[in-house]
Image (tube, rainbow, N blue to C red):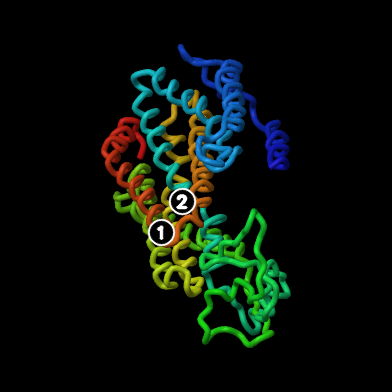
Amino acid sequence: MFIGVITFIAGTRHYIAYDVRKPLQPGDMPLWKILTIVILPSLIFGVIGYYLKGTGTGNNYIFDSDSTDAFIFACIPVLIFYTALLIRSSKEERPAMGAMLSIFAVVILFWAIFKQNGSALNTWASRYTDREVQGVLGNVFSSLKQTDKAVNTTYKLDSVVKTDHQFRKVKVDGKEVKELGYPSYFKNIPPEKLPKEGETVNAWLPSLSQSINPFWVIALTPLIVALFTWLRRKGKEPSTPTKIAFGLLISALSVLVMVAAVKAGNNGAEKVSVWWLIGSYGVITIGELFLSPMGLSLVSKLSPVRITSLMMGGWFLSTSIGNKLSGILASKWDQYENKASYFWLNFILLGAAAVLLFVLLKWLNKVMREKGVN
């Protein structure tokens, strides 16, 4: 990024310099005032949130951690600022501002579910997915140091950390309990599929499952672009809000794949194929391609030019809040005995967001038409 900035600055000497900034409108605030009434209060609220203690027994925080509390409290002045922007906007600008802020609020739930690839879904890959690789493929993974050395995958009795049926470490007085047993990886492998005593199994790293989404992005982007191009030629290309609404719906369907995976593995009693993860990631990637690029496009189309940067910030604020909510949800993973219930919760959240956006779709499309964009 630094090299890109240097290249841009060096290239500006080839162009005639001109100022593209729009003049301040009545009621607009200069940058120093924005910093004073937004950034400074956010810092103060963040500190308050960090040191504010929860009311639950033994809790030193309200949500998930002190840092989470600090983040959520720091967002409050920013949210008030965007609300004030909407209220203070002119009659001509208000519908577009309202449309953008409505979509920002709804897509928070998309990011809350989507960003679980590094938490809950990584846990699923680690504990409930058959990660064994054999033969030449196993040797390749091993030579590239992509096999799981964090756990001992040699099938032999040894001193191991005791875990329950949900792979949760058993602790007494805050200390891990040790026992004579086999590595936890083999806990939910059917007896007929267990290796011989002393045999080593190559298992790929759970973190490799996070590369499935980037693979699908590369593979599916040309197809999605081709689909929208074909619909445009037919005069049937959906509007940007419609694409976002379908993105939420498709993403919700991806969670149902994981519900089926839980059923296939008898709630974790047996490991399941990695194809369940691949399928779930494939579906949610389609939802991502319907939604994520459309958000930035929506801002560029609807935002008043003089505050486009601020509204872009609003989109990324919704992304960051969704990311934090994702962590809060994932922290509850071990509290669900039936993992299908956890995924059903995710489905309900995404489904509710999709339904809400479809309800607002008529109004959103009307705003888009009035602005002369699609």
Q: Name the residue under label 2.
A: 113
Tell me which amino acid carries mark 1: Val
Dot 1 crowding, Cα within 10 Å, few <14, some 14–19, many 20+: many
Secondary structure of the residue carrying tag 2 is: helix
Q: Position of residue 312 (x, y in %)?
A: 51, 34
The answer to which of 209 and 306 lies nearer the viewer is 209
> As drawn, which residue projects farthest toward the top?
26
Residue 200 seen by the camera: yes
Q: Name the residue under label 1.
A: 255
Dot 2 crowding, Cα within 10 Å, few <14, some 14–19, many 20+: many
> As drawn, which residue projects farthest toward the front?
173
Residue at screen point 57% across, 84% down:
194
Tell me which amino acid carries mark 2: Ile
Alpha carbon separation for disc pair 1 and 2? 9 Å
Residue at screen point 61% across, 62% down:
207
Q: Position of residue 264 (x, y in %)?
A: 41, 72
Q: Where is residue 105 in the image (x, y as percent from the top left)?
A: 41, 37
**Can you tell which mark lies on residue 15?**
none
Q: Which of marks 1 and 2 is nearer the N terminus?
A: 2
> Against 111, is 139 above or below?
below
Residue at screen point 34% across, 50% down:
351
Quadrant containing the C terminus in the rendered view: top left
Indicate left or right for 248 with 335 as reference. left
> Against 40, is 26 above or below?
above
Residue at screen point 58% across, 73% down:
131
Q: Are marks 1 and 2 in contact (CB under 8 Å)?
A: yes
> Against 317, is 132 above or below?
below
The answer to which of 247 and 14 lies nearer the viewer is 247
Indicate left or right for 105 with 325 as reference. left
Secondary structure of the residue carrying tag 1 is: helix
